[in-house]
Amino acid sequence: MTPAEIAAARPEPPPEPGGRTPLARARQRMEATGQWHPLQSMGLRFSMGCVALEITQRCNLDCTLCYLSDHSEAVKDLPIEEVYRRIDMVRDHYGPNTDVQITGGDPTLRRRDELVAIVRRVRDRGMRPALFTNGIKATRDLLTELRDNGLVDVAFHVDMTQERKGFGSEAALNAVRGEYIERARGLNLSVLFNTTVFDGNFHEIPAVAAFFVERADVVRLASFQLQADTGRGTLRAAEAPITMDTVVERLRRGAGASIAFDTSFAGHSA
């Protein structure tokens, strides 16, 4: 966004010294929009659901539903001092305990010492650093070092849109998911998985859900994100009836249980 576009969006300024805390301001916004509820984390635990901190646009995959632009690989990495400035800005706006998703591109393509320093900076500012990665370069050794410097969550993105060689189905990709689970096992990290639901894997979602249920001793959260018409990806709008309701039905089928999706809320319902 340009400075003019940012100004037009009128982002809320950092809190004034002695004024309402970011958490109190979030609670007020939830109440004003009719979104407040005892199970609402916005304004109770968080002042912002999460913040994505993009530290590179380089990636070692070329997903068919990539949200980046055609020119992303030509974009140079932000200088480390600029990344630090943005981390400090997030802390000033949203306060302590904010979840900061360190993402890209794939953040593991950043120099290792810089990635470690970025995680440490987020932790030292009293926030919660999470690594969002396709997992290819997220070795156990790297995850251990990041954990030692404050990493609390690691979110692996694995699905058929990535066109990983040698894997012809979502079921086959469970081998990759299983390897990543073992890399993180015992490191005291919250392990998350992201799966894009699209025409090519819609029918396999129950099997993927069952896989995660069987490994719930390590996997804390599984996120299923619907196909969207965005970015440089070659796939566009979904042709199959992929909706929130149809995906929920398949998740319940795979879990073998009537999963409740209203046990917690994290921000505006829209």
Image: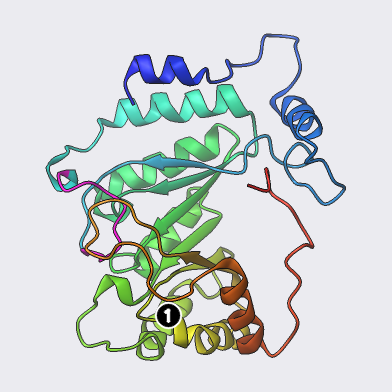
Viewer-proximal residue, 52 or 268?
Answer: 268
Question: Is 217 positioned to the left or the right of 151 in the image?
Answer: right
248 within the magenta span = no
Q: How crowded is mark 1: few (under 14 residues within 10 Å), some or many (20 or more)?
A: many
SS type, badge 1: helix
The residue lying at 79 percent from left, 29 percent from top is 32
The image's colour scheme reads: rainbow
Q: Quick check: can you spot residue 216?
A: no
Quick check: 112 above or below 16?
below
Q: Please tell me in which quadrant of the rendered image residue 117 appears.
A: top left
Q: Measured from the top left, where is residue 209 in percent x and y?
A: 56, 82
Task: Identify the residue shown where x is 35% and y is 56%.
Answer: 229
Q: How many labels does the image show?
A: 1
What amino acid is found at the position of numbered circle 1 in the picture? Arg
Q: Where is residue 167 in the image (x, y as percent from the top left)?
A: 27, 87
In the image, residue 147 lies at what x, y percent?
49, 56
Q: Nearer the viewer, residue 84 or 58?
A: 58
> Which residue in the protein does label 1 denote?
177
Q: Residue at x 54, y 40 (%)?
A: 123
**Highlighted range, magenta:** 61-71
Q: Does the magenta stretch include residue 68?
A: yes
Image: 265 above or below 83: below
Q: Which of 229 and 26 is in front in this view?
A: 229
Please say whether residue 95 is visible from this viewpoint: yes
Give the prevailing secondary structure in the magenta stretch: loop
Residue 32 appears left or right of 55: right
Q: In which quarter of the image is residue 133?
A: bottom left
Q: Residue 237 location, x and y as percent?
A: 35, 62
